[in-house]
Image (spheres, rainbow, N blue to C red):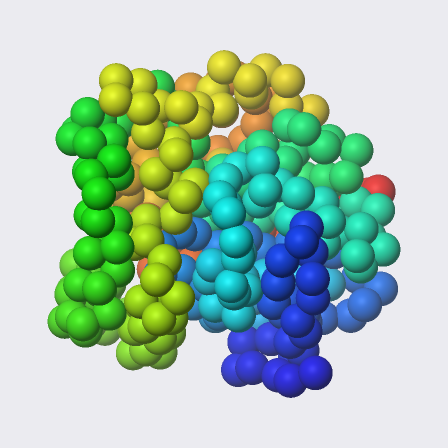
Amino acid sequence: MTTTTTFDEVRDLTVAGGPVRLYTSGRPDAPPVLLLHGAMLDTAELDWMHVAPALAEHFRVLAIDLPRHGGSRPWPGRVDQALLQRVVIGLLDELGIRRAALVGLSMGGGVSIGTALDHPDRITAAVLLAPGGLGARRPAQFLTWLFTRTPGALRATTTWLARSSSAVRRSFVDNLQHGADTPGLERAIEIARREADQKHQHREPGLDDWQALAFGPFAMRTDFLPALHRMSVPTLWVRGSEDPLVLQPDLDAAVAAAPGARSVVLPGAGHLSTLDQPDEVATLVREFLTTHAETGA
C-alpha cells in the first residue's frame, strides 16, 4: 500500500472485471462514505483533495478513480451508467461493506443517483453535488449530440487537452470563484494535466462514455427526473449558484420529486464546489451524514 497527500492508503483492486484504484482514510470502524468524482479530467485526488481529509475525521472515507480515470486503467468496452453502478456495488462487496453513504460530484452524482435508486438496500444516504443526469434537454442539445457522433472528434479533444496546458489552466481559472487565487489550484491543474496525458496515451476519448451516451439528438437519454419519486434513501442536493452546467430549475425539479429531499445553494460557487468552497461542502456533508450514515452502515 502507498499513501497520498489526500488519503492515508491506496490499493489497486479488480472490480466488475477491471482495475479500480481505491483510496481510504479514517477509522475502519467509522460509518463508510464512498466519494465519486466527476468526468473528463477529474480524479479522486483532484475533486476530493480538500474535502476527504475533513471527512476522514468523522467517517471511514473511501474514494475510487472511476474506470478510465487516474489509476483505474485500462478498461475495455463501454463504460456506461450500468457498468459504473456495478463498480460501486462490486466495490462494497469486495470490501465486505453491507451499506454505505455516497457523495458524488457531477458524473459521480449521476452514478450515485442511479445506484441509490437501484440498490436502496446498500445505500444509507446520498449527497449529490451538481449531479449529472437531470433534465430532458440541455443547451445546444443537437450540436452536442452531433459532436459526440462525429468520427475522430472526441479523440481530437483528448489530443488538444494533452498538448495545451494553457487550455487546462484556463478551464480551472475561468470556472472557480477565486480564479488563480483558489487554494490548491496549482496542484489541481497538475493532476488534470497528468490525466490529460494519460487519456492521450491510452487513446481514450475526451468525453467519458457516460457523457457521450447521455445525449440523444433531441432529448437526453440519461434523465433521472422521472424516476426520482422512487428514491427511498435520504438525499441532499447541492448546487453552486454560478454553476453553468447544472441548472437550478432541474435541481429544483429533482428535490421536488425525491421524497424527503433537502437542497442547498452555495452562493458564488461554480461546478467544482469541492475546490471552490471545500470547507462549506465538507460541513454540509458531515452534518447530513452524521444524521443518516450512522444508521445501517
- Residue at (67% x, 78% y) in the render: 9
State how many labels appear. Answer: 0
Q: In front: 207, or 187?
A: 207
Residue 261, by quadrant, is top right
Q: Is residue 238 above or below residue 3?
A: above
Residue 216, by quadrant, is top left
- Residue at (39% x, 48% y) in the render: 208
User: Can see residue 126?
Assistant: no
Question: Residue 142 at what x, y percent from top left?
Answer: 19, 25
Image position of 153 (left or right of 9): left
Image position of 120 (left or right of 259): right
- Residue at (24% x, 31% y) in the render: 145
Q: In front: 44, or 252?
A: 44
- Residue at (49% x, 44% y) in the render: 78
Question: Residue 253 at what x, y percent from top left?
Answer: 42, 20
Question: Residue 5 at what x, y percent from top left?
Answer: 53, 82
Q: Is residue 193 above or below residue 145?
A: below
User: Can see residue 215?
Assistant: yes
Residue 85, by quadrant, is top right
Q: Is residue 68 above or below residue 233?
A: below
Q: In front: 112, or 199?
A: 199
Which quadrant, please, contains the N terminus?
Answer: bottom right
Question: Residue 75 at what x, y percent from top left?
Answer: 53, 57
Image position of 166 (left or right of 294): left
Q: Is residue 62 above or below residue 135?
A: below
